[in-house]
Amino acid sequence: MRIVHTSDWHAGRIWKGKDRLDELQAILDELAGFIEREKIDILLVSGDVFDSGVPAAAAERAVFRFFRRMGATGVKTVVIAGNHDSAARLEAWGTLTELVDVYAVARPRPADRGGVISLDTRSGEHAIIAAIPWAPVRDIVTALELAVDETAARQRYADWMKLIVDNLRRSFRRDAVNLLMAHTHLDGAQFGTSERRVHLGEEWAATAQVLPSEAHYVALGHIHKPQRIEAAPSPTCYAGSPLQLDFGEAREEKSFVLVDAHPGRPAQIERIPYRKGVPLELVEAPLAEIERHADALRKAGWLRVTVPLTTPDPDINGKVRRLLPNALVVEAKLPQEDEQQPEVDRASLSPAELFRAYFRNKHGAEPADNLLEMFKELRRQAEGSDE
């Protein structure tokens, strides 16, 4: 049985004013082509299909078009909800997508109420898939428990994860390929830089030891950095996001997981890099060097550009963006002051003097006389004074 594990698509994501749906569609086309060529039996999507609980129609069309293509090839797909997905919406469209062999699990459920999916694949083998979608902490731990004993509340979250895993693993069979999917944070996993940790912080984590040793493979979602959890008792991976989602992930190779598994035998795990994503790149160079290499830099992907300066240049942002329309972030890097500046007694300064000091600190120059007069006039108007 051949299985592909992908995760954290974040379809519909708008980042720094850029709609990245075209990038994701190119990656999904690449993934679909691989699945078709390699005769994949099962596709696992471990959450955060969308970037928002109310995704744009274009994002939904792109995702459903991909699922329809998968169904037409004979692949069976299992999708679980992540913290960015709407469980209610996923449940609603999941009742229809089963027509193209896409099975959605929106909320954690016991095995006998939809928490386990059994599939017969075209390879002739049987798969048992235990599914644990994302569960908000508030659904597991009450505010009162958190207020009374925070440590005990966090332990309750870890205990809940163990209980649901123990319930689902009872459905595993020796004559089947046993898989577990979860959208959660495991203790010891390395965060990337683009996860919204407010949804599930580092303290709210289950231990890898709660995972079932009899699983052929455990497919995890939520953390965007691709990685294998070595402490787990069975092969366990975060697939990671297919797109580099912010500049902290620049130059990070994104990939999906290919699993070859058969009943009664250890699974073989391989990472397959995505090749169609637009890369994020970090550039640090003087403006003259940027001008010399502008043609190549315009083709390098989305850029974060840092320009070393000897003196402040208020128009550095505009100069770089005129050269490089793909520069999403432009920063000036000024020399560090060797001497510590004397502490200013703000209480002894007039508002105009405070403004002058702020402008000098921000721009390295004195404000023009007309700007200073404008500040004084605005202050007079704000105070309602004719002085």
Image (tube, rainbow, N blue to C red):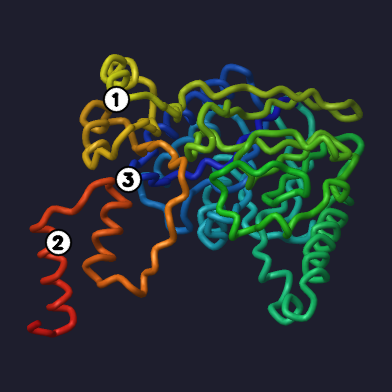
Q: Nearer the viewer, residue 138 or 197?
A: 197
Q: Is residue 21 left or right of residue 229?
A: left
Asked if residue 377 lies left or right of residue 87, the reply is: left
Along the line of sight, the residue nearer the viewer: 269 or 114: 269
Around disc 2, counting alpha carbons within 10 Å, would you say few (fewer than 14), some (14 to 19), or many (20 or more)? some
* Front disc: 1 or 2: 2
Name the element at disc 2: helix
> Which callout, 2 or 3, points at the residue further toward the start of the chain?
3
Element at label 3: loop
Q: Is residue 321 above or below residue 19?
A: above
State the quadrant of the C terminus: bottom left
Q: Which residue is mark 2?
A: 372
Where on the picture, by quarter, is residue 376? bottom left
Labels 2 & 3 near each other (Cβ < 8 A): no
Residue 9 in picture, x, y percent from top left: 52, 41
Q: Which residue is mark 1?
A: 287
Closer to the observer: label 1 or label 3? 1
Residue 84 percent across, percent down from the top left: 53, 54
Q: Which badge, 1 or 3, comes first in the chain's sequence?
A: 3
Task: Using residue 71 as the reference point, say whether residue 345 is left or right of it.
Answer: left
Q: Amino acid at mark 1?
A: Leu
Say what amino acid the circle numbered 2 marks. Answer: Leu
Q: What is the distance, in whole Å, between disc 1 and disc 2 at their CAs? A: 31 Å
Q: Which comes sooner in the sequence, label 1 or label 2?
A: 1
The front one of 169 and 255 is 255
Mark 3 residue type? Gly
Identify whether 183 is placed above or below 119: below
Label 1 with label 2: CB-CB less than 8 Å:
no
- The residue at which mark 3 appears reads as 17
